Amino acid sequence: MKPLRALVVDDSAYNRRTISDLLESLPDVEVVGKAADGNEALRLVRDLSPDVITLDLEMPRMDGFTFLRLLMARQPTPVIVVSGYANKENVFRALELGALDFVAKPTRSVTTDLAAIRAELLEKVALVRHLSRLGGVRPVERGARAEAPSRTPGRPRKVVVIGASTGGPTALVELFRRLPPGPDAAFVIAQHMPPRFTETFAARLDRLGPIHVRQATRAHPLQAGEAWVCPGGQCAEIGADGQLIVLPPAATDRYVPSVDRLFESAARHLRQRCLGVVLTGMGDDGARGAAALHRAGARVLAESAETAVIYGMPQAAAATGAVDESLPIDALGRRLGQLLD
């Protein structure tokens, strides 16, 4: 296997050295360049054609956001944002501009818990390898934003349960932008994401789409026109009374939040009142749950390989025979709107 050629972009010399050392400690990774700002990074991308870029967002001369816009227009390349917990909003802005994923560093410098950061980098590098076999990254497409909701909250006719992983934040933004205003439905989202990021992500979804979106914290009644994001590090289920409940992960949960647990609980307690959606992601979380929804008489939609960053979770769900329709994210949003009309 050819080494994965990495470019490290960070205005801190210490961070550049530390991240480079971490990357080169991974199997078959070679750091081919380091840049202190976006201008230097663009020149190195042109000269070196790296396979992956790690990117700090706050830099002098040209920041990470401007770099991302220019990079994705000129030479789309997988970008992993390395950012602190204090800059959560910036992370989601970068994902919307085309970054592939992110690694959360505990502080401004990469001094704390290096082993955990190394494990995360190993996971993201594996993702880039997988993506390169599928033809690389795709340019980000922008959908129109829907108007604000007009429906008064009440008991929803339908409950839409959504599962996503890698590439999910961008896919969910595109999906929610295309939903019609005031749908007679409630939404529950299980997005694989670290703790402390899901609240910011929910707030970003709330601003971008027609649905009122919040992070779930305990037990919540499901209301039409509202959506709940399962908090990172926890799991969400639909209870026997039809409420959303937040629970700690079980020892048997391979993924947290668990899409399977959310889908299976919805199948048990909502049956045909439920509609399942499986979006982009590596692995097979949601496949077992999609099969349970199908057996309960619920409809299941999945994102197609055409737009999925990683066609792992949707493909695994489709392989069970439970998926009624596989569609690109823009068409999926429109179709969901039709089914909720």
Image: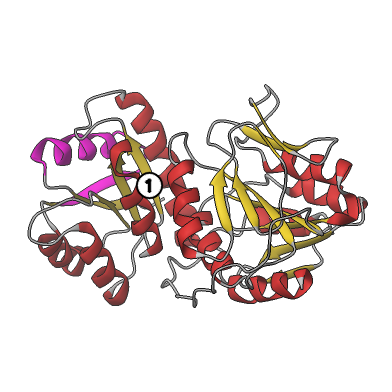
Residue 161 coordinates in the image, percent (x, y): 71, 52
Question: Quadrant location of residue 141?
Answer: bottom left
- In the figure, 111 relative to 58: above or below? above
Quarter that holds the C terminus = bottom right
Q: Is residue 20 magenta?
A: yes
Residue at x 17%, y 58% (from the top left corner): 63
Residue at x 50%, y 57% (from the top left corner): 206
Residue 338 coordinates in the image, percent (x, y): 75, 75
Residue 3 visible: no
Q: Which segment is the magenta one? A: 12-34
Residue 11 coordinates in the image, percent (x, y): 11, 47
Q: Residue furthest front?
A: 152
Q: Which residue is mark 1?
A: 102
Q: Secondary structure at mark 1?
A: strand
Residue 234 versus residue 155: which sits nearer the camera?
Answer: 155
Q: Is residue 246 magenta?
A: no
Residue at x 76%, y 69% (from the top left corner): 340
- Crowding at label 1, few (<14), some or many (≥20) Cα neighbours within 10 Å? many
| In the displayed structure image, the side of residue 139 where residue 240 appears, left or right | right
| In the displayed structure image, the side of residue 334 where residue 271 appears, left or right | right
Residue 308 coordinates in the image, percent (x, y): 57, 64
Q: Amino acid at mark 1?
A: Phe
Question: Quadrant location of residue 62?
Answer: bottom left
| In the displayed structure image, the side of residue 216 where residue 124 appears, left or right | left
Residue 164 versus residue 205: which sits nearer the camera?
Answer: 205
- In the figure, 231 relative to 287: above or below? above
